[in-house]
């Protein structure tokens, strides 16, 4: 399952898809935090969660 999830996550960055504004800033920050918690575990999907959390975190504006 990790390979399937990672394929979906990697496809997001490579795809020439229209991005949709689906989340508020707070929801996006919470999503990154939850993904980081999932990534900290050794369970199924941890690597994909870590990859997606990093991708999303890089697109968020810096806090300040």
Image: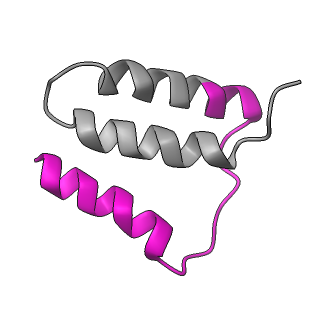
Report whether 42 appears left or right of 56: left
Q: Which quadrant of the rendered structure holds the C terminus?
A: top right
| Image vertical order of residue 61 relative to residue 59, above or below | above
Position in image of residue 4 (x %, y %)? 17, 57
Position in image of residue 58 (x %, y %)? 63, 46
Position in image of residue 5 (x %, y %)? 24, 51
Which region shows up in magenta? 1-29
Q: What residue appears at the point 82 percent right and 27 percent down from the top-left corner? A: 63
Report whether 6 appears left or right of 34: left
Report whether 9 appears left or right of 62: left
Q: What residue appears at the point 26 percent right and 54 percent down from the top-left corner? A: 6
Which quarter of the picture shows residue 41? top left
| Image vertical order of residue 33 relative to residue 52, above or below | above
Q: Is residue 59 magenta?
A: no
Report whether 27 appears left or right of 16: right
Q: How many marks?
A: 0
């Amino acid at each position: 399952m990790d390979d399937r999830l990672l394929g979906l996550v990697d496809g997001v960055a490579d795809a020439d898809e229209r991005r949709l504004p689906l989340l508020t800033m707070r929801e996006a920050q919470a999503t990154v935090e939850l993904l980081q918690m999932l990534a900290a575990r050794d369970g199924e999907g941890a690597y994909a969660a870590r990859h997606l959390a990093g991708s999303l975190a890089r697109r968020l504006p810096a806090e300040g």
